[in-house]
Image (cartoon, helix red, strand yellow):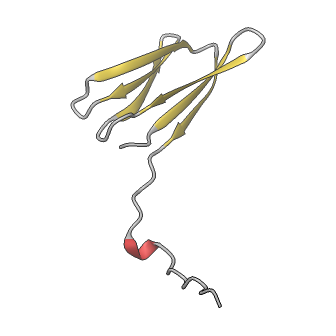
Amino acid sequence: MVGDRVEIVVDAGGATRTWEVEATRAGRRVDIAHGRGVVEVSEVTRGGTPVRTARFMSSRVLALVEHPAGQARLADDEPPALPLPRPA
């Protein structure tokens, strides 16, 4: 889904740094895996092949924020259009 995005906030020794991993094309998704002291965030194709991967030490990760793709709006979801005022 286009729009899947994960923000990773990491302690960088007195300051924080933020990275973003985003699904750049339709059909891709962002997967998060953690284990053995490592957090891994990957952009993955439909077939499961990782396109790019970011790895962080789990002891340094302060926050993982997931932003899922929004669903497409349907025609009946939108409010009715109001007529524009005409000049006098």
Which residue is depicted at the point 24% across and 35% down? 46
* Residue 30 located left or right of residue 28: right
As displayed, is residue 3 above or below residue 49? below
Q: Position of residue 43 (x, y in %)?
A: 37, 27
In the rendered image, the residue lying farthest to the front is 88
In the rendered image, the residue lying farthest to the bottom is 88
In the rendered image, the residue lying farthest to the right is 14
As displayed, is residue 43 above or below residue 76? above
* Residue 11 located left or right of residue 84: right
Quadrant assignment, res 52: top left
* Residue 27 located left or right of residue 75: left
As displayed, is residue 12 above or below residue 30? above
- Quadrant location of the N terminus? top left
Q: Nearer the viewer, residue 17 or 33?
A: 17
In the rendered image, the residue lying farthest to the left is 47
Which residue is depicted at the point 61% across and 85% down? 85
Q: Position of residue 74 (x, y in %)?
A: 38, 68
Which residue is depicted at the point 32% across and 35% down? 28
Which residue is depicted at the point 41% across and 76% down? 76
Q: Position of residue 64 (x, y in %)?
A: 58, 30
- Quadrant location of the C terminus? bottom right
As displayed, is residue 70 above or below residue 44? below
> What is the number of callouts on the image?
0
Q: Nearer the viewer, residue 37 or 14?
A: 14
